[in-house]
Amino acid sequence: MQEWPFKVLIDGECPLCRREGRILAWLDRGRNRLVIEDITAAGFEPTGIGVSMQELSLIHISEPTRPY
């Protein structure tokens, strides 16, 4: 089982996505309920959450057991 309840995937090349990621991280404030992950970061591997890069345009958040 993963250690995070929710993972929010953002496009780190998009200023709006980066801002939303910072806001969500601020709202989480150390509760460790969210992980913000940049899909454009070197080494990002979407297969770890069971999706392809092509499918990421449809995914905004995932739980350890299933992507949305």
Image: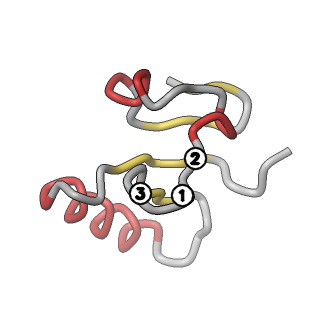
Element class at badge 1? strand
**Is residue 47 toward the left or the right of residue 7 in the image?**
right
Q: Which amino acid does label 3 sit on?
A: Asp
Quarter where residue 50 is shown: top right
Q: Position of residue 12 (x, y in %)?
A: 29, 59
Q: In the displayed structure, would residue 50 be above or below residue 31?
A: above
**Residue for point 45% across, 48% down:** 8
Q: Label 1 near label 2: C-beta < 8 Å?
A: yes
Q: What residue type is labelled 2?
A: Phe
Say which label, 3 or 2, has the lower sequence index. 2
Residue that carries the numbered disc 1 in the rendered image:
34
Residue, far left:
15
**Residue for point 30% across, 50% down:** 11
Say which label, 2 or 1, has the lower sequence index. 2
CA neighbours of label 2 inside 10 A, class few (<14), some (14 to 19), many (20+): some
Report the quarter where the N terminus lies.
Answer: top right
**Is residue 16 toward the left or the right of residue 28 in the image?**
left
Q: What residue type is labelled 1?
A: Leu
